[in-house]
Amino acid sequence: MTRIALVASGDLRESANLQCWPAQSAMEARLAEVLAERGHELVRAHPVKPEGHGFIASQREGMDIFAALNPEMPLIVAEAVWQYSHHVLPGLTSHRGPILTVANWSGQWPGLVGLLNLNGSLTKAGVPYATLWSERFDDTFFAAGLDEWLATGKIRHDTRHVRPFEHADLAPEDRATVAGIAQDLRRNKAILGVFDEGCMGMYNAIIPDELLMPLGIFKERLSQSALYHATLQVPEAEGRAVLDWMRARGMTFHLGTDPATELTEAQVIDQCRMYVAAVRLADSFGCEAIGIQYQQGLKDLLPASDLVEGMLNNDDRPPVTRADGSLIRPGRAIVHFNEVDECAALDGLLINRLHRALGEPVETTLHDLRWGGADASGSRDDFVWVFEISGAAPPAHHPGGWAGSESLRQPPMFFPAGGGTLRGVARAGEIIWSRIFIEGGALHMDIGRGQAVDLPPEELRRRSEGTNREWPMMNAVLTGVSRDQMMARHKANHIQVVYASSAEGADRAMAARAALAQELGIKVWLCGT
């Protein structure tokens, strides 16, 4: 019998660890059963705590656990929840035994999201690992992969959907557009405003400066304390004016009176003040894009930043003025990269410039690859992903725009100070998806095509209730990429999505962006058909 160690990385927020523990405990019990059936013993490398959960909840705790672990022992990192990768990454970088990351296929808590972030972080760090996912851990795919790992320490996944991008047959005007954007970036350069780096341990989301500099892109390192101070300087009347603007556009706010559990008008007004402050800081520092970390530090001071982020990423957004009364970038989105994901920042900046030049929609967002499956209503027979992020989708992605968007209170276990989301169900249409990631010390981009699709109301309810109903959702089909191919290849919890006006326009924009990324020195991979 082989003894296999298990570690479980968790959240930094104890409220989340406690609420999510039952799902994690059930997953671990099932894994132990499956391994016992194969003659192996699964042994937790750290005990369940008296507090009532068994998660590693800090980087130091993770280091101490790995220091006492046999570095040659086979190791499973099991995740049924969102987790902070830096809790276990230091130990994994020096572990010599075979590593397997495993997640449960469920939308309840973002275990798949946590798995993909850890995988992306391990890829960036150059740590070898194998990965698997399953709903019940009894399917043929999971069983075959587990048996392969037990025998060899590795798993070979099907990634035939990926091929290197070599060149695109662009129209002369598109070639000129690509060359012009690349030349302008290198000559005039651009700034990413980073309000504190490394949100939620997302090592994979930090691009080293030396990889950005050759592209003509640099970071302005800002502090969330500056954003907090600037927010407090915005008069309440200005925040209320932003709220009135959104209401006039038809957006619905589901308000209550108990700030501990309900969305209050005061919370929303503070979010609107944060929006005004963020726009002014971006303008003051000349940032083409900004990213707010929020989760650490700011979560104890202000309501959630997600409503702010969705507003920023929309061309049609509430006006903000400078001290002299002039408007700041009127009618233009200020690219925001949620959770300070710098890979999404670079991608979003390129999308904004290129799509504006091509006359295509510029509104972009990153979503989590939250979950997915067949349409239970039977209206479709293909695999439909659930992309979902914590309330930061631009209204342009929703049917009816602002009028098709609503705001609900963020879940208290993640957002103790409350604040509203910018929620909607993404409209049907042609999309381009992408992800910039780091492997082998270099920048790479995966890019492909797909469609956001409409589903019947009962199926939308099922999906929403199976995840976080407060958050915006895109139901997406990825062209020529299966579920398991996507999971095997993707190097991040986030996926970047942007619409195009037509299938032809999407194909054109995808080819042009691949060419632009290649021109800037990024290794581009086409995914799917």
Image: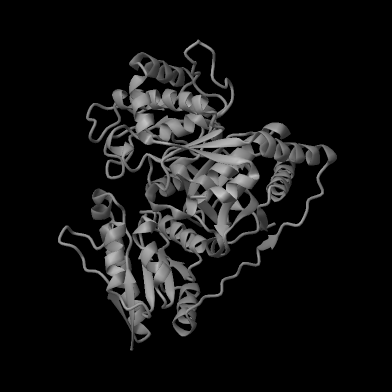
| Residue plotted at (58% across, 34% down) | 363
Q: Position of residue 26 (x, y in %)?
A: 29, 66
| Residue plotted at (57% across, 27% down) | 315
- For the N terminus, the image quarter is bottom left
Residue 78 sits above or below residue 305 on the image: below
Q: Residue furthest left?
A: 50
Instruction: State the residue in front, 466 or 168.
Output: 168
Q: Is residue 120 left or right of residue 268?
A: right
Residue 104 sits above or below residue 508 on the image: below
- For the C terminus, the image quarter is bottom right
| Residue plotted at (27% across, 49% down) | 13
Q: Is residue 136 left or right of residue 165?
A: left
Instruction: State the residue in front, 62 or 272.
Output: 62
Q: Position of residue 48 (x, y in %)?
A: 21, 65
Residue 319 sits above or below residue 36 on the image: above
Q: Residue furthest bottom?
A: 1
Residue 396: name its quadrant: top right
Say how many tags the image has.
0
Q: Position of residue 252 (x, y in %)?
A: 41, 26
User: Is residue 124 visible in this depiction of the protein?
Assistant: yes
| Residue plotted at (60% across, 38% down) | 349
Q: Residue furthest top?
A: 324
Q: Position of residue 232 (x, y in %)?
A: 33, 23
Residue 527: name its quadrant: bottom right
How is the structure coloured here?
A: one colour
User: Is residue 56 visible in this depiction of the protein?
Assistant: no
Q: Residue furthest right?
A: 172
